[in-house]
Amino acid sequence: MKKPDMLLTDIERSIFAKALVISIIAHAALLGGTSFSLFADWGKYGVHSPSYINAQKSKENKEAEAERRKAAAEEKAAEEAKKAEAEKAAAPAKDAAKDAKAAATNAAPSATPATAATPAAEDGKVTPPEVEPLPPKKEFQLGDDLSLD
């Protein structure tokens, strides 16, 4: 027969305390390891909720995108200004070449197939050829093999 004190020896050796400590350590390691980016955001934005931090990030991204677009627009405007300046400088030479071409055309009139197919107006603009309109739309008719009966 066992004495009551012998029955309590197994209870004294319980692993509850050891399991509790191991569980706390494991949870702390798991949460700490997976929350590293949150801790980094807390270092940058202060200790706030993730929704507040995401709102701040999206605001910063929009501002950066606006700055990038503004810089691209300024760069494009500068390129167009350079191009316009170059065209303005080359305009006298282009006019002289156009006058020489007009004089050569007047001296030897001949119609090429390209100019005959696309007639030019008096001001020099090329007009597209006339396009025939589509035939009128027919009413819907059932085929011979279809019936509503």
Image (cartoon, rainbow, N blue to C red):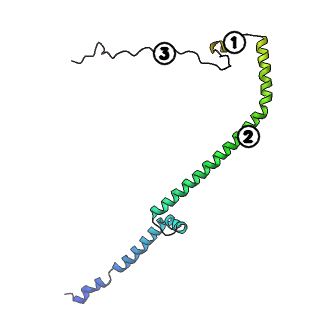
Q: Which residue is mark 1?
A: 112
* Horizontal arrangement in the rendering, residue 99 relative to residue 33 (left or right): right
**Which of labels 1 and 2 is toward the front?**
2
Of residue 45 and residue 7, the one placed in the foreground of this image is: 45
Rendered image quadrant of residue 84: top right
Q: How far apart are the two marked residues, 1 and 2, measured between alpha carbons?
A: 37 Å
Q: Which residue is mark 3?
A: 133
Of residue 37 and residue 81, the one placed in the foreground of this image is: 81
Residue at image coords 51%, 64%: 37
Q: Residue furthest left?
A: 1
Q: Earlier in the sequence, mark 2 or mark 3?
A: 2
Counting other residues with Cα less than 10 Å from the Cα at mark 2, is it few (<14), some (14-19), or many (20 or more)?
few
Residue at image coords 23%, 18%: 148
Rendered image quadrant of residue 4: bottom left
Amino acid type assigned to the residue bearing label 3 in the image: Pro
- Residue 137, label in figure: none
Q: Which residue is mark 2?
A: 82
Q: Earlier in the sequence, mark 1 or mark 3?
A: 1
Amino acid type assigned to the residue bearing label 2 in the image: Lys
* Horizontal arrangement in the rendering, residue 65 relative to residue 85 (left or right): left
Counting other residues with Cα less than 10 Å from the Cα at mark 3, is it few (<14), some (14-19), or many (20 or more)?
few
**Which of labels 1 and 3 is toward the front?**
3
Amino acid type assigned to the residue bearing label 1 in the image: Thr
